[in-house]
Image (tube, grey):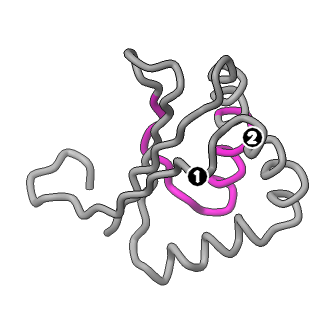
Amino acid sequence: MLFELRQYTINEGRREEFVNLMEEKVIPFQIAQGMTILGSFVSEEDETTYVWIRRFHSEAERERLYEAVYDSDYWKTEIAPSVGEMMNRESISVKRLEATPRSAIQ
């Protein structure tokens, strides 16, 4: 099992719009393709921070699902342009994690 902790910097004043995009389009689309999204978060201290967590059973599954999502016409035409307008892509931070034996998230 592997996890991705993804942190984004959202452009000033765009947080509500970005959260709506994630919750109405991005997350439902990725779930429909087979991804598991464990959580979606905004920072209490910083209006520009957005974090979410995805889980994959294996590296092979992650690669297959990345292809299904990011190579799709829907992603390229409907989602990617909007995401790019609302966030700083250069600030994307992705941490690949493994849960410890007693972690509540498995």
Q: Point out the residue furthest to the left here.
A: 102
Residue lying at 26% horizontally and 56% vertically, measured from the top left: 106
Count of numbered badges drawn on the protein: 2
Residue 98's place in the image compared with 8, above or below, is below
Residue 94's place in the image compared with 25, above or below, is below
In percent of width and height, residue 4 lies at 41, 58
Quarter location, residue 73: bottom right
| Direction from residue 81 to residue 31 in the image, left or right | left
In percent of width and height, residue 47 lies at 51, 19
Residue pointed to by mark 1: 90
Marked residue nearer the N-terminal end (1 or 2): 2
Quarter location, residue 69: bottom right
Please, what secondary structure does the residue beneath circle 1 have? helix
In percent of width and height, residue 50 lies at 50, 33
Whether residue 43 appears in magenta in the rendering, the answer is: no
Camera-nearest residue between 13 and 83: 13
Numbered range of the magenta stretch: 23-41
Residue 87's place in the image compared with 92, above or below, is above
Q: Point out the residue furthest to the front here.
A: 90
Badge nearest the viewer, 1 or 2: 1
Residue pointed to by mark 2: 25
Camera-nearest residue between 35 and 92: 92
Alpha carbon distance from label 1 to label 2: 22 Å
Binning the other alpha carbons within 10 Å of mark 2 as few (below 14), some (14 to 19) or many (20 upward) gives some
Q: Quadrant of the N terminus?
A: bottom left
Residue lying at 63% horizontally and 28% vertically, measured from the top left: 19
Q: Amino acid at mark 1?
A: Glu
Q: Amino acid at mark 2?
A: Lys
Whether residue 28 appears in magenta in the rendering, the answer is: yes
